[in-house]
């Protein structure tokens, strides 16, 4: 089943369709930017107005380059700021998506407070060569 596009913005990046929208988060005082690929494999959420020191992106979908365990529990990683002067534009959403698909980005896992967490020892062992 395709993702709903009603009242949502659409982007085409590298011949792939994405839908994005901003919603109020009932559990916090933040608005949340949601970005979803048309096939629903790539799903991320970004809370607006996060402090720089604890800013993160939430990975909800099973596709996220650099994270082989994406798609299970929510994964949070440190990320750059996407909004400019509290405004999200199609260009800033495009930058977010392009950053997510970069091969050489550093992924620092964080907890729900945005504080770095240690990776499980098993993952460290399997990723070292």
Image: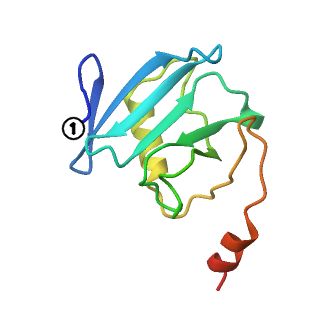
- Give SS at disc 1: loop
Q: Position of residue 74 (x, y in %)?
A: 57, 44
Q: Position of residue 58 (x, y in %)?
A: 56, 40
Q: Position of residue 93 (x, y in %)?
A: 42, 33
Q: Residue at x 67, y 26 (%)?
A: 50
Q: In the displayed structure, would residue 80 be above or below residue 72? A: above
Q: Position of residue 17 (x, y in %)?
A: 24, 41
Q: Residue at x 21, y 49 (%)?
A: 15
Q: Quadrant of residue 27?
A: top right
Q: Is residue 51 left or right of residue 32?
A: right
CA neighbours of label 1 inside 10 A, class few (<14), some (14 to 19), many (20+) = few
Q: Is residue 35 left or right of residue 73?
A: left
Colour setting: rainbow
Quadrant including the C terminus? bottom right
Q: Residue at x 57, y 14 (%)?
A: 26
Q: Is residue 19 left or right of residue 117?
A: left
Q: In the displayed structure, would residue 10 be above or below residue 78? A: above
The number of numbered discs placed on residues in the rendered structure image is 1
Q: In the displayed structure, would residue 90 be above or below residue 76? A: above
Q: Residue at x 32, y 43 (%)?
A: 40
Quadrant including the N terminus? top left
Which one is nearer the viewer's eye here, 85 or 127? 127
Tell me the residue that label 1 is attached to: 2
Q: Quadrant of residue 120?
A: bottom right
């Amino acid at each position: 089943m395709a993702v709903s596009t009603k009242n949502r913005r659409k982007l085409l990046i590298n011949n792939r369709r994405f839908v994005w929208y901003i919603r109020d988060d009932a559990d916090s005082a933040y608005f949340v930017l949601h970005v979803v690929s048309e096939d629903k494999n790539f799903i991320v959420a970004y809370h607006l107005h996060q402090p720089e020191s604890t800013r993160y992106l939430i990975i909800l979908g099973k596709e996220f380059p650099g994270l082989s365990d994406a798609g299970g529990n929510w994964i949070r990683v440190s990320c750059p700021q996407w909004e400019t002067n509290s405004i999200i534009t199609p260009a800033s959403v495009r930058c977010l998506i392009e950053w997510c698909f970069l091969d050489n980005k550093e992924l620092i896992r964080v907890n729900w407070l945005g504080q770095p967490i240690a990776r499980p020892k098993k993952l460290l062992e399997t990723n070292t060569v």
